[in-house]
Amino acid sequence: MVPVLLEGQRYVLTYRFSQDHLELLFNSIRASEFVTTVAGITTLIASQFKYIFRKLMARCGVVKPCSKGNVTAQDDTESLPAVAMSSAAQSYHIYISTNLSAVDMSSAEEGEDLPSPFADIPALVHDHSYLPTRFDGLVDNALVYISGFVVRRTFKKLSCDVCRASLVTDAASASKDKSYHLLTLRNNGGLVIPSEGTVSVVRAAEWVIRQASADSRRSQPIKLLEVLYIVRKRIGPEDVFLLGEHIVDTQYGIDSHHHTLLTLVVSLFFKLRLHHIAKITTLSLQSGSMRQKLTKTVLFKGH
């Protein structure tokens, strides 16, 4: 990097290579309302940092660090500048520069493409969700086991034999899938073995619920209609229940037996997960109560 910098310059300001600008960026992040400090320890989760950094990027050139930080700015360098480039390309490029002269600005307005700092980078890391797209073996086996319970509850509300058959599968085909290992071990002949389509719907609903639980910016709990909307969007037009022509035969407007099955499975699983979330929340609130822990001792031994 040094030969490239010194090729057309007589000197280089070494202050530009110091970590002061990074410290000033962290100073702006710590000044956010989401950062809390308890007993000298600063806490900030990944989703909050992602939200703060997006706000900083949206306010390029306007962000000013706090004056109470351990580093003070010694020049007018902007930490996150962004300049709109050629409109013919219909895209925006980030041009890293500490000072843009009037000549640079005029050339940008005339449509001249400025060099991109990412030209030598083979691939860019795009923004994405850090939640797993596929659950691990333990969670996957638990979801399959719960799916069987959901199917048993669904049977009580279904009268169509074709739809009933699409929710279950035989034990021989399920034994070949590692996700059915827990269900196979626990099954003594009385458990319901869910089909692959039913498990796919339950997995999609679980992913939506976990994503909503991990989002710290949500002020309201997730609703059933929201879960149904996202699950339908993730599954798309795929015939997960393998109903085939039965969908066309039962089509009435925008409703069909496929739509009814998807709604039933998601709503029953969502209700079950809400009970579990409420139970976990109650246990966490009562974790410090000795009376709750020693209830049986107090009632039966009189201590």
Image (cartoon, helix red, strand yellow):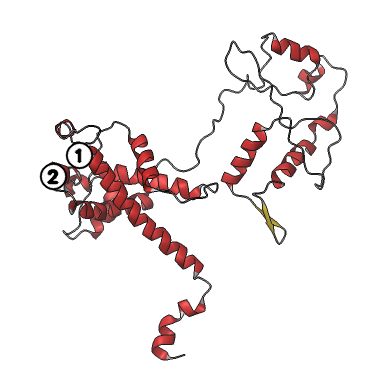
Query: Residue at (31%, 43%) from the top-left corner?
Result: 201
Asked if 287 appears above or below 79 in the picture, the reply is below
Within 10 angstroms of label 2, few (less than 14), some, or many (20 or more) residues? few
How far separated are the C-alphas under marks 2 and 1? 9 Å
In which image quadrant can residue 256 be found?
top left
Give the structural element (helix, strand or loop) at label 1.
helix
Q: Are marks 2 and 1 in contact (CB under 8 Å)?
A: yes
Q: In the depicted view, which residue is nearer to us: 188 or 106?
A: 106
Q: In the depicted view, which residue is nearer to us: 270 or 144?
A: 270
Give the structural element (helix, strand or loop) at label 2.
loop
Residue identified by numbered label 2? 160
Residue 283 rendering spot, x and y as whole percentages: 46, 67
Query: Residue at (76%, 18%) from the top-left corner?
Result: 4
Query: Residue at (42%, 61%) from the top-left corner?
Result: 278
Asked if 278 appears above or below 100 in the picture, the reply is below
The three-letter amino acid code for the residue at tag 2 is Cys
The three-letter amino acid code for the residue at tag 1 is His
* Mark number displayed over residue 257: 1
